[in-house]
Amino acid sequence: MAYPKGRRSPNFKDLVGKRFGRLTVVERVGSSPEGQTIWSCRCDCGKFATAKGGNLSHGHTKSCGCLARDRAKEIHTKHGKCPRSGSTAEYALWKHAKKRAREQHVPFDLEVADITIPKTCPIMGTKLAVNTGKPRGNSPSLDKFEPEKGYVKGNVWVISYRANAFKSDFTVAQLKSFVAAIERGPGCDRDVNAARNVLLAGAGAAHKRRLRHVA
């Protein structure tokens, strides 16, 4: 119900001087068509905003709009995502790992801060390069030390995509067989192919595609 100009609702409450979130009510400036009192408020950031009394009292309006912006910025910063410049490489690895954890039904408790991209691959010694689009052999890739433990703190490191593709989720015994096949006898090409066959024999279809892609 709308009340005539100058007439207040019987439920009128004077909110001048009261705080609601970041807002401090300064003065009454009018009424809405449905009869709600409209207040002028000063925000902690220094800006002024108008709000309905009901929205203030029920916690629907807590700032001039800066609170929502600050919260969004905090979320982006926490996960390493910059609104203007886009995702960082660490954030991209974190996001992909979270997706993989869901698909593989393994634990995940990582934060972006847990991911550090070294200058070189700790396995192959090659320089890592952050690329956009399809990953390349020297792209950084997040690897699990013990696959069954999942993507959890202390169980991951960043290596090259090529190294991760060969390592995949194979056991130490399988990796030793891989090395032994390379070192055994003359004919390096033959032994490399034999080593790849050792790994492919224990790999799933997706891992086989990855191995062939980086070979």
Image (cartoon, grey):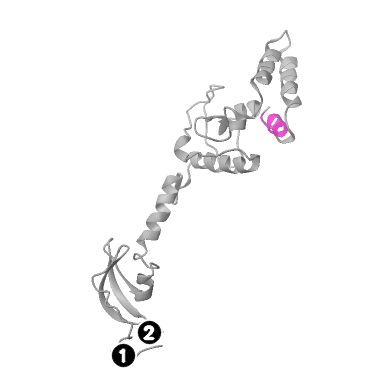
Identify the mark at residue 189; answer none if there is no mark: none
Q: Label 2 neighbourhood size at 10 Å, few (<14), some (14-19), many (20+)?
A: some
Magenta stretch containing residue 183, yes or no? no
Which residue matches tag 2? 35
The answer to whether residue 207 is seen in the rendering is: yes
Q: Nearer the viewer, residue 79 or 56?
A: 56
**Residue 19 place in picture, x, y as percent:** 28, 66
Hey, which quadrant is residue 210 in on the image?
Answer: top right
Q: Quadrant of residue 192?
A: top right
Q: What stretch is highlighted in magenta?
A: 207-214
Position of the C terminus by quadrant: top right
Place residue 41 in its image quadrant: bottom left
Q: Which of marks 1 and 2 is nearer the N terminus?
A: 1
Badge 1 vs badge 2, beta-carbon distance below 8 Å: no
- Is 104 drawn above or below residue 73 in the view shown? above
**Rendered residue at 47%/40% (across/down):** 112
Q: What element carries label 2?
A: loop
Tell me: residue 5, above or below residue 180.
below
Q: Position of residue 144 (x, y in %)?
A: 57, 30
How far across and down, in percent of the image, does residue 193 sit?
Answer: 74, 20
Classify 30 as above or below 205: below
Residue 5: which disc?
1
What type is the residue that disc 1 sits on? Lys
User: Number of marks in the image?
Assistant: 2
